[in-house]
Image (cartoon, grey):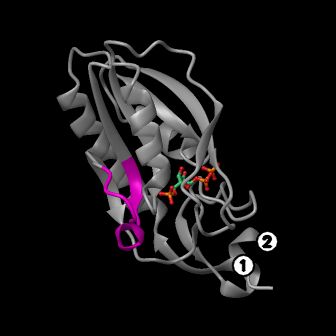
Amino acid sequence: MLKEDVAEVLITEKELQARIAELGKAISANYEGKDPLLVCVLRGAVVFLSDLIRQITIPHEIDFMAVSSYGGTRTESSGIVRILMDLTTNIQGREVLIVEDIVDTGLTLAYIIENLKTRRPASLRTCALLNKQERRQVDVPLDYVGFVIPNKFVIGYGLDYDEKYRNLPFVGVLKPEVYIE
Ligand code: PRP
């Protein structure tokens, strides 16, 4: 059972949903009349995006991109990022909001911001469910943040270890014996 690999529940399903409702409300107020495009960074953010948009009450669109960092180890990012799947939407002149599940070193988001900026959107902002602030290597502007979390190996609610645990409805900490061989 996946749940048996969880050492502790860091953020409960109820806490997640309550905070996401607040984020949805803030985004709806700030983007009123602007038809924003929410850019979901696959794969982890897909669970967050799907709950977030159901808390947004204004017209908006969604699109997806997939990036991968390579050259690093499983837990350490190299900072080299490449686009595996690009947006299908032309974002020139659009109000763009990048949706991420977690910002850790910040390298992935920094790359995405720089890349999307070159396409000249009207505005480019960021929304991250989880901010692992103490791991940051590069400064990235976070406009909407769900929770600041400690430097622990988190899984669930979209976040995986070895592609598993994304389906857990809460954010949990993985038992070390699962990933230390
Ligand atoms: C996670 C997360 C961010 C990135 C953050 O994705 O969704 O994109 O890592 O790390 P960073 O701030 O150190 O760059 P991951 O590479 O695990 O892919 P996934 O979303 O497909 O699980």
| In this view, 102 is above or below 65 | below
Q: Amino acid at mark 2?
A: Met
Left or right relative to 126: residue 109: right
Q: Position of residue 16 (x, y in %)?
A: 41, 57
Q: Could you tell me which quadrant the N terminus lies in?
A: bottom right
State the CA–CA distance, disc 2 to disc 1. 6 Å
Circle 1 crowding by C-alpha within 10 Å: few under 14, some 14–19, many from 20: few
Q: Position of residue 88 (x, y in %)?
A: 57, 16
Q: Could you tell me which quadrant the C terminus lies in?
A: bottom right
Residue drawn at (40%, 19%), measured in percent from left and top?
119
Q: Which residue is mark 1?
A: 4
Q: Nearer the viewer, residue 156 or 138?
A: 138
Q: Please report contact status of discs 2 and 1: CB closer than 8 Å, yes or no.
A: yes
* SS assignment at label 1: helix
Residue drawn at (41%, 53%), measured in percent from left and top?
129
Q: Which mark is residue 1?
A: 2
Q: Is residue 106 magenta?
A: no
Q: Which residues are magenta?
A: 128-140
Q: Can residue 110 be seen here?
A: yes
Q: Is residue 129 magenta?
A: yes
Q: Amino acid at mark 1?
A: Glu
Circle 2 crowding by C-alpha within 10 Å: few under 14, some 14–19, many from 20: few
Q: Position of residue 45 (x, y in %)?
A: 53, 45
Residue drawn at (31%, 30%), measured in percent from left and top?
124
- The image shows a total of numbered marks equal to 2
| In this view, 167 is above or below 121 | below
* SS assignment at label 2: loop
Q: Nearer the viewer, residue 141 or 62?
A: 141
Q: Can residue 54 be seen here?
A: no
